[in-house]
Image: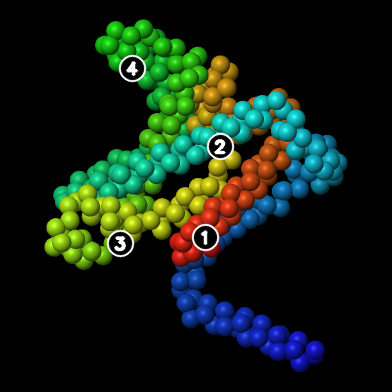
């Protein structure tokens, strides 16, 4: 038994020594990696120490550490609420819609830009479609309001008036907003996705296309049989990562763009906005932390399930 333990200790020490030797060999690359590692630790791992807040009744008199421990009582807020089904349904359906719609549009734009033979136009198009990604959702909300203003908006005063249609009070009509939010989210988000897929397409060996041209393949067949299968691993990885946020929503999109109109809650209220309003009314930090923890756990489970499904279909394309 002592001999086996000694062998294991020796192997472990040898493994650690090998890691340090490798880090020293690539020390300059390790130094370049340090800022990203520090940011990851500070923004992603350090806040995890606050998970215990979800199990406490936080008050500012006792402070975070001495506030009473309430166990799972904070989680009962969401489950006992009559709005649980509505906000969960809206959150999941919007996330899936955004994921599929943005994927199709991003890949289509990336393929279209890749087919341009002009050296300047692709860079111009990339800059134009990427620009909305850097806009604040507050700015976007006012841009949308400029279009949908009931009395002076572009849609009512120009588009609908030109067709002879009566003005629509957009912020009082809940049926239109699933389409409006999908378009706004796509306008802001497809640019960054397209840039990622353009980079993936740029890595395809040109000899594949040359061989396809020799065989008489059209552009469409080249896209179907070369471009899309080659970037499929990138699509799968991004899809798996997107599944982690399926129970979370863009707070700014659903709160700012809709102007927090109460009439629109049946189709625009999601977990994030519901918890925010509850936090404003109740000032319950523990409850909001419990909701965020629940979203993270469910997102993690969805990533595991999606990756396992991909692994069963094609092990090489799984994320882990």
- What x and y, as percent, mark residue 24? 52, 80
State the mark number for residue 312: 1
- What x and y, as percent, mark residue 116? 19, 48
The residue beneath circle 4 is: 154
The answer to whether 16 appears left or right of 81 in the picture is left
Give whichever of discs 1 and 2 has the lower sequence position. 2
Q: Are marks 3 and 4 in contact (CB under 8 Å)?
A: no
On screen, residue 44 above or below 95:
below
Foreground: disc 4 or disc 2: 2
Quadrant of the snapshot with the N terminus:
bottom right
State the mark number for residue 92: 2
Q: Secondary structure at mark 1?
A: helix
Does the rendering let one see residue 280? Answer: no
Q: Residue at x 51, y 34 (%)?
A: 94
State the mark number for residue 203: 3
Does the rendering let one see residue 290? Answer: yes
| Separation (CA) of disc 3 from disc 4 | 42 Å
Q: Are marks 1 and 3 in contact (CB under 8 Å)?
A: no
Q: Are marks 4 and 2 in contact (CB under 8 Å)?
A: no
Foreground: disc 2 or disc 3: 2
| Separation (CA) of disc 2 from disc 3 | 34 Å
Q: Residue at x 57, y 40 (%)?
A: 248
Q: Assess disc 3: are there few (<14), some (14-19) or many (≥20) residues with their C-alpha within 10 Å of its C-alpha.
A: few
Q: Residue furthest bottom?
A: 3
Give whichever of discs 4 and 2 has the lower sequence position. 2
Of 214 and 51, nearer the camera is 214
Give whichever of discs 2 and 3 has the lower sequence position. 2
Q: Residue at x 66, y 82 (%)?
A: 12
| Separation (CA) of disc 1 from disc 2 | 24 Å
Foreground: disc 1 or disc 3: 1
Q: Assess disc 2: are there few (<14), some (14-19) or many (≥20) residues with their C-alpha within 10 Å of its C-alpha.
A: some
On screen, residue 262 above or below 248:
above
């Amino acid at each position: 038994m002592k001999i086996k333990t000694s062998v294991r200790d020796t192997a472990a020490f040898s493994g650690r020594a090998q890691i340090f030797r490798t880090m020293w060999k690539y020390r300059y690359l390790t130094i370049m990696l340090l800022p990203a590692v520090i940011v990851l630790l500070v923004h992603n791992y350090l806040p995890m120490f606050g998970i215990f807040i979800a199990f406490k009744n936080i008050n500012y008199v006792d402070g975070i550490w001495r506030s009473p421990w309430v166990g799972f009582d904070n989680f009962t807020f969401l489950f006992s609420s009559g709005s649980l089904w509505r906000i969960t349904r809206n959150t999941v359906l919007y996330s899936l819609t955004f994921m599929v719609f943005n994927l199709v549009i991003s890949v289509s734009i990336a393929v279209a830009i890749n087919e341009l033979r002009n050296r300047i136009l692709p860079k111009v198009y990339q800059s134009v479609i990427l620009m909305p990604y850097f806009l604040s959702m507050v700015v976007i909300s006012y841009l949308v309001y400029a279009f949908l203003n009931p009395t002076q908006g572009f849609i009512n005063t120009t588009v609908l008036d030109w067709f002879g249609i009566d003005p629509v009070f957009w912020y009082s009509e809940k049926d239109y907003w699933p389409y409006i939010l999908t378009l706004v989210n796509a306008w802001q988000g497809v640019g960054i996705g397209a840039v990622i897929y353009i980079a993936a397409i740029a890595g395809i060996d040109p000899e594949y296309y040359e061989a396809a041209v020799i065989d008489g393949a059209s552009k469409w067949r080249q896209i179907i049989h070369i471009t899309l299968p080659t970037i499929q691993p990138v699509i799968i990885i991004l899809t798996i990562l997107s599944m982690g946020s399926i129970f979370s929503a863009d707070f700014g999109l659903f709160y700012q763009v809709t102007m927090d109109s109460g009439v629109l809650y049946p189709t625009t209220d999601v977990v994030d906005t519901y918890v925010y309003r509850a936090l404003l009314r109740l000032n319950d930090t523990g409850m909001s932390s419990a909701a965020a923890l629940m979203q993270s756990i469910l997102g993690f489970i969805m990533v595991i399930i999606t990756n396992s499904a991909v692994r069963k279909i094609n092990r090489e394309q799984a994320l882990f």
